[in-house]
Amino acid sequence: MKRRTLLGGVALGLAAGFGRVAVGQAKTKACFIYVGPIGDGGWTYQHHQGALAVQAAFGDKVEIQFQENVPEGADAERVMTQMALGGCNIIFTTSFGYMDATNAVAAKFPDVKFEHATGYKRDQPNVSTYNARFYEGRAVIGHIAGRMTKTNKIGYIASFPIPEVIMGINSYYLHAKKANPNVELTVVWAYTWFDPAKEADAAKAMIEQGVDAIASHTDSTAPLAEAAKTPGVIGFGQGSDMAEYKPSPRVSSIIDNWAPYYVKRVGALMDGTYAQADTWDGIAGGEVEIGEITDAVPADVKAEAEALRDAIAAGTYHPFTGPINKQDGSPWLAAGQAAPDGDLLGMAFYVEGIKGDIPK
């Protein structure tokens, strides 16, 4: 399964070519591998902003190198190997599907630090993992969708059936349902992380079925562009703010803010405090941000959404708090019980009320 989709030829930026380290310069070399293009407007764009933040934070003490449009599998392993051979001190592999390649290459280069985004395998002592609680943001936009839909039909464009995506669907639906008991959810599986044509087709199909509030777990702005063609349809920025579609259809957004983490980890490597880690921060930690809620959202709905965001940040509310049943009606969480992280990280079921099956 591909975590992000290959668009075309490989492009290299900021540092020209692998293995090119200036003689006599004691710089830390931080390298980044992206599946999509840095101009995707979503996931990869936001990771690249984090890389630029590292450069800004440490100036000439660091050298930044990145490679975009790298597919998973053999190509990813080859690129990681080239980066390690080229003098990279720390390599950020920013896609779920890079997980096995990251650990395989890390075993060959024990002196290089590897950081894998959204994965869970740390088979080597020089591999760390980092993730964000995207489901917290889904709760907030789900509330907005539930309160603003006029047709009671909301939609979700899903990428691949991995726990990260499934928990997002469930959180979006649960909070839309709390806001509006009459909502029905349509899920369209795009089987891609970045394919503007497929994403646009998915949004168009939903709109034709009467869906007027669309969330997505894919990387391009195409769903918002499609929503903009039909008055009254709203959507949400995904990965980055996608502000060009404000004030509507983009009425808010989920922003992945990787910069603080990247600066922290590179800084730790530079000052000698670096250690293997597994992190999973959310709104409270600043890795998940809720973009501006525009004036297209009624004032009372905006206030409710902001209160929900703040309660999540304060730790007084968990988006998965029971009573919640699984899709088949079997109990999952008792009243007042918050979901354990292990349940979320392995989530492979819909909650009660969502129709349809999760692809295998």
Image (cartoon, helix red, strand yellow):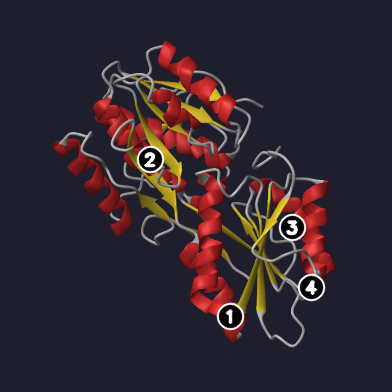
Specify few, some or many for label 3: CA neighbours under 10 Å numbering under 14, 14-19, or 20 or more: many
Choose mark 4 or mark 2, whichever is in front. Answer: 2
Count the numbered circles shown.
4
Q: Mark 4 belongs to which amino acid?
A: Pro
* Marks 3/1: CA–CA distance: 27 Å
Q: Secondary structure at mark 4?
A: loop
Q: Mark 3 belongs to which amino acid?
A: Thr
* Residue 299 in sight here: yes
Instruction: Compare marks 3 and 4 and give the one earlier in the sequence.
Output: 3
* Marks 4/2: CA–CA distance: 44 Å
Instruction: Compare marks 3 and 2 and give the one earlier in the sequence.
Output: 3
Quarter residue 1 falls in: top right
User: Would you say 297 lies left or right of 60 here?
Assistant: left
Residue that mark 2 sits on:
244
Residue that mark 1 sits on:
60
Residue that mark 4 sits on:
110
Instruction: Compare marks 3 and 1 and give the one earlier in the sequence.
Output: 1
Tell me the residue at 77%/76% (across/down): 111
Instruction: Compare marks 1 and 2 and give the one earlier in the sequence.
Output: 1
Q: Mark 2 belongs to which amino acid?
A: Glu
